[in-house]
C-alpha cells in the first residue's frame, strides 16, 4: 500500500516480523508511493547487505530523466514506464514477470522497458 509497508515487509518488521527468512526473487517497485517513495525504498534496499542483491524493477509513470538517472545510480535492474490503460499495464507486468523468470541474466547495466 505504501513505501513504509514495503520496507517493513523487506526488513521483516511490524506485521511482517514473522514472515519467512527467504528474500523475494525480484521486487517490482513504484516510485510514486505514499509515506516513503520508491527511490527511498530503493536506497534502503541497496544499502542493506542482504537486500542489495535482489533485482528491482521500477514501474513508474515518471519519464523524468532525474528519476531514471537516480535509479540507475542506485543499481536498479530495470525501469519500466507504466502504460496508460489498465489492460496494457496488466500485459506489461505479465511480460516483465515472464522476462524475469525465463530470459533475464544479470548484467551491469539496467534494462529500460518502455511500453509503446
Image (tube, rainbow, N blue to C red):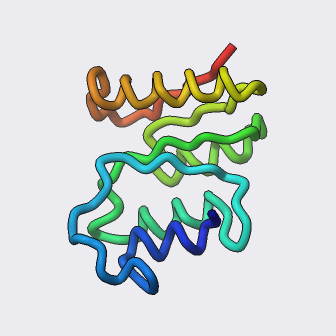
65 with respect to 94 (left or right)? right
Q: Residue at x 33, y 53 (%)?
A: 54
Position of 56 relative to 23 (above/below): above
Whole-percent x, y for residue 69 in the image: 64, 43
102 with respect to 87 (left or right)? left
Whole-percent x, y for residue 85 in the image: 75, 25
Q: Nearer the viewer, residue 81 or 90?
A: 90
Q: Residue at x 29, y 34 (%)?
A: 106
Query: Which image quadrant is residue 59 in?
Result: top right
Q: Residue furthest top?
A: 116
Query: Which image quadrant is residue 37 in?
Result: bottom right
Whole-percent x, y for residue 103 in the image: 29, 21
Q: Residue furthest bottom?
A: 14
Q: Nearer the viewer, residue 94 or 40?
A: 94
Position of 3 relative to 13 (above/below): above
How many callouts does the rendering have?
Answer: 0
Q: Residue at x 72, y 54 (%)?
A: 32
- Looking at the rendered image, the quarter that the N terminus falls into is bottom right
Query: Which image quadrant is residue 5 in?
Result: bottom right
Q: Residue at x 43, y 50 (%)?
A: 27
Position of 73 relative to 17 (above/below): above
- Looking at the rendered image, the quarter that the C terminus falls into is top right
Whole-percent x, y for residue 58 in the image: 56, 43
Position of 28 relative to 11 (above/below): above
Amino acid at each position: 500500500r505504501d513505501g513504509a509497508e514495503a520496507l517493513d515487509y523487506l526488513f521483516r518488521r511490524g506485521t511482517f516480523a514473522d514472515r519467512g527468512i527467504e528474500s523475494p526473487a525480484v521486487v517490482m517497485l513504484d516510485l510514486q508511493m505514499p509515506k516513503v517513495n520508491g527511490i527511498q525504498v530503493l536506497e534502503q534496499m541497496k544499502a542493506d547487505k542482504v537486500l542489495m542483491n535482489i533485482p528491482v524493477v521500477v514501474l513508474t509513470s515518471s519519464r523524468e530523466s532525474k528519476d531514471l538517472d537516480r535509479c540507475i545510480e542506485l543499481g536498479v535492474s530495470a525501469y519500466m514506464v507504466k502504460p496508460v490503460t489498465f489492460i496494457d499495464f496488466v500485459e506489461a507486468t505479465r511480460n516483465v514477470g515472464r522476462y524475469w523468470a525465463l530470459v533475464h541474466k544479470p548484467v551491469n547495466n539496467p534494462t529500460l522497458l518502455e511500453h509503446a
